[in-house]
Image (cartoon, helix red, strand yellow):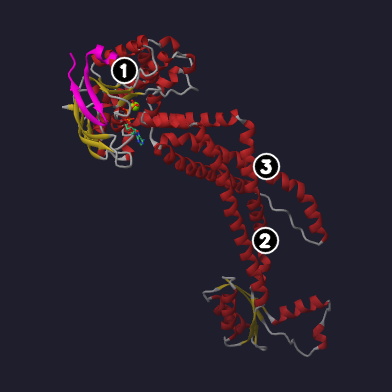
Amino acid sequence: MTQSDKNSAGKSAAQQKSASQPTVAGQKRKRGANTSKLSLDARYESWLRHHRQVAVDSAERLIRHPVASILTMLAIAIALVLPAMLWLGLGSVRALDYDLDSSARVTVYMESGASAKQVSELADEIRNEQSVGSVKVITADEGLHEFQQALGVNDATSLLDANPLPATLLVTPKEREPGAVDALSRQLGELNGVDEARVDLEWLERLHDIGVLGQRLTLGLAVLFGLGVLLVVGNTIRLAVENRRKEIEVVTLIGATHAFVRRPFLYSGAWYGLGGGVLAVALLTLGRGWLSSPISALAQSYGSDYVMPALGFSGSLLLLICSILLGLLGAWIAVGRHLADIRAR
Amino acid sequence: MAIISFEHVGKRYGGRFEAVADLNFSIERGEMVFLTGHSGAGKSSVLKLLTCLERPSRGKVVVGGRDLNTLRNSQIPFYRRQIGVVFQDHQLLFDRTVFDNVALPLLIQGIPPQDAARRVRAALDKVGLLYREKALPIELSGGEQQRVGIARAVVNKPALLLADEPTGNLDPQLSADIMRLFEDFNRIGTTVLLASHDLALIARLRHRILRLRQGRLIADEEGA
Ligand SMILES: Nc1ncnc2c1ncn2[C@@H]1O[C@H](COP(=O)(O)OP(=O)(O)OP(=O)(O)O)[C@@H](O)[C@H]1O
Ligand SMILES: [Mg+2]
């Protein structure tokens, strides 16, 4: 099917459609209706064609002013790097989650002399609690064994008449929120056959606070620097709109919709966002390469096998998506404000 | 039925003063009409009301049976696509070729490129500038630029053609040429409404004349 066949096939549908739109041509002159209305298919095609054209055209406009474009992208990249770094840092704190887990753990000491059966029954009972994640049983014998290993003695029992250690249950709660852990610990302490339930609340609270602080700091900075990206893109687009004011006025006069006017600027914003995002990923990767060897050397000297966190594929993708969206949003706001302004004159 | 009718239309741009006051007239399909009057009489205001650049303060403007007051903002672009407008300062884009300038309305409407090219060439041919399609507007004379503006206004084959001082900066010879062009479009059925204060030129052409003074219609002279 050729282009013109398609058009004539779509005409009857297009004429129906024209009834709902204001028409100057009226009944006498169908000619105007035929030439200015398109079938749905052709509309979609032309919409796609215009998007392609505008995408290429706005990219070319950026390339025509390489220095200005790169500077804008660099400004975006720098605004993205800091929150991204904090976010990565937060990720490596999360790698220390094991520490958080173990400090949130409630240690339940059984009354001494509890039989193995009693211990496992109690463990099952605790496991059935809603707020409990997992329960690990350490029998009196295992406890003694660990104790001996820790002391470096082979046979401490030889000094004692009997095993003085109680069986213990290590209860990991589902929630690590200090209040909830404290409540769980009290509840466990009340159980029959339990001597005492303990948890290091102070340490837990401290870790919890550090975690919350880190998250808020990252979030706050991300919002702040995201705003920075919006401003950078918004200002650049504002200038672009100003440069093309005449063109906007003309196309508006001859029937361009808001979407049509906005489109090239949205694409510019998206290109700036993409460029800034790519630069940010490059900066983060370079920075990591530069810092990682001294940092792991330092960590090793403390006996840690800490490795600097990397952005990775999904992290890079997320960063790119965020920066493109920020670019689009910045452009949208700038054009919207400016369009209202232009129409007002 | 009239293609344009003004019913008790008033327009004030803020303040008490009415740029257009209680204006009543109608224009039939296929007519060619001049709108004239001294500077500040309200000619441009009438055309702005017709292109929805301004909304009337009172009364209603009906075009093609549609009361423009009932047009939603989102419908205005689609309404504008159906009328051709020629501006005094032609409003061409100087970073695009003549061809691209004329193609602009078709681009906005998403007409397929081959189709658009055919229509652009037809419009340029009508105004006698087909051979300059690749030129930039800056390389053209004032009269040629105005003709490109006219080609752009008619490329979409509008039923209604509006022009605000289309011969404003042109010498009498060129002005006459441009007017002849409008008459050609009128001859094939296009309704033409033309604002001009070039009284001598208008008088020679013998079309209907609407005279405005201080926003009021003071004379409606039938053409010969
Ligand atoms: N946007 C506006 N804001 C305020 N006043 C306006 C505006 N546009 C026009 N006017 C006033 O309305 C009156 C009519 O103006 P209009 O432009 O319609 O006249 P005109 O007949 O086209 O004049 P000219 O021949 O000089 O172009 C004038 O007094 C003008 O000052
Ligand atoms: Mg005027």
What residue is shown at x 75% (from left), y 80% (from top)?
A: A144
Element assignment for label 2: helix
State the residue position of label 3.
A282
Residue B209 sits inside the magenta stretch:
yes
- Chain of residue at mark 3: A
Residue type at mark 1 is Asp
Element assignment for label 1: loop
CA–CA distance between discs 1 and 3? 65 Å
State the residue position of label 1.
B198
Q: Is residue B59 above or below residue A162?
A: above
Residue A167 in the image: state x and y as whole percent. 67, 82
Q: Is residue A336 left or right of residue A136?
A: left
Q: Residues within 10 Å of mark 1 (few under 14, many from 20)?
A: some
CA–CA distance between discs 3 and 2? 23 Å
State the residue position of label 2.
A93
B141 or A249: which is nearer to us?
B141
Residue A265 sits inside the magenta stretch:
no
Q: Which quadrant would residue B71 be assigned to in this image?
A: top left
Q: Is residue B12 above or below residue A123?
A: above
Asked whether mark 3 lies closer than 8 Å to ligand 1, one says no
A27 or B160: which is nearer to us?
B160
Residue A139 in the image: state x and y as whole percent. 68, 80
Determine contact: label 1, label 3, CB under 8 Å.
Answer: no
